Image (cartoon, grey):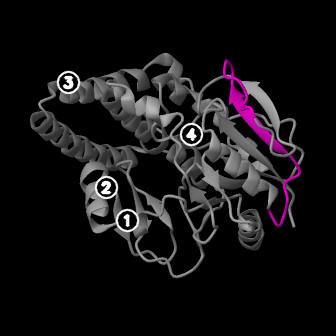
Amino acid sequence: MLSYSVAIRTLGTAGEVFREELLSLGRQTVPPERVMIYIAEGFPRPDFQVGNEEYRWVRKGMMAQRMLPYDEIASDCILLLDDDVCLAPDSAERLLSSLEEDGADCVGADVFRPQRMRPGAKMKAAVVNLVFPHCSRTWAFRMHRNGSFSYLARPKREYYRSQTCGGPCSMWRKDAFLRLHLEDELWLDALGFPYGEDALVSYKLYRNGGRLGIRYDSGVENRDARSSSDRYRRDPDRFRIRSQALLMVWWRSLYRNGTDTPCSRLLSGSAFALKACWLTIGMAVSALVLLKPKVFSAHLRGLRDGWKTVHADSFRALRPYIF
């Protein structure tokens, strides 16, 4: 079986949830060669040591703490984790098995389980984010021209190919991860919160000819400590950040991605324009209901700022998303 090491990004503030994660790594039926923890500069390490985990201080940012060269890791694969997941004893073994059996470059764990959401939550995802279920026999998750994804409504097998995956837990072949030049996507950290990061990273693998899969029975649970996202949720400017990120991630990965043609730009541009109109109506209604007009103005500022940024020389100079 392929060897692997673990890479966890953290601020060191997840507390007991993070400790339980480290304990679960120590119980793996296929143990990792190393457990590397990439903690943001300026944050102290937790006051506990569970096993042989090693700490490296790196530049703060959810993208910056993940898009690393990993020179210190010599394993075949890297299990990328957030600091708030808990693994079953055979989680790593299951992910590695699927990786080898399918010849995949990355296998993600289905930690958010949208297909299991209650009807009300599914309706909210559809109305607010245009995220719908699908009935494909091939794909776990599909990316669409408007920048929204869809999910398999009723998985029949434990493993499916996918076009995108969530970020809390994914097993990557190290060479495939490094080939993607994900350092080119560090621009997302500049927004304050990397909204859309999971799709930007994993979809890049799919669009560059890599093989991505989803394991539905990985046994990985998301404990959602929200050590980073809580700051975003408390930020009154979050609606601007969300709208700006939506536009920029769509532009980079679907509109001007390196293989775009006039026809593809027309189709993708039309799809996103309809989505933007729908979201703008939703934001206007929310602003009226909540009596918070700044919600609507922040959304419009985000779209404006995103449009300006994607036309900036620094953004246009990035290596093509599909290369």
Q: Secondary structure at mark 3?
A: helix
- CA distance separating discs 1 and 3: 30 Å
Amino acid identity at mark 3: Lys
Q: Nearer the viewer, residue 62 or 310?
A: 62
- Confirm whether the magenta stretch covers residue 220: no
- CA distance separating discs 3 and 4: 34 Å
- Residue lying at 64% horizontally and 44% vertically, measured from the top left: 16
Looking at the image, tell me whether mark 3 or mark 2 is earlier in sequence order.
Answer: 2
Amino acid identity at mark 4: Tyr
Amino acid identity at mark 1: Met
Residue on which the image places disc 2: 125
Residue on which the image places disc 3: 294
Q: Are marks 2 and 1 in contact (CB under 8 Å)?
A: yes
Give the image location of residue 127, x and y in percent. 24, 54
Q: Is residue 88 above or below residue 293?
A: below
Q: Nearest to the eye among marks 1 and 4: give it.
A: 1
Residue 60 marker: none
- CA distance separating discs 1 and 4: 32 Å
Q: Which stretch appears magenta?
A: 28-47
Amino acid identity at mark 2: Ala
Residue on which the image places disc 4: 321
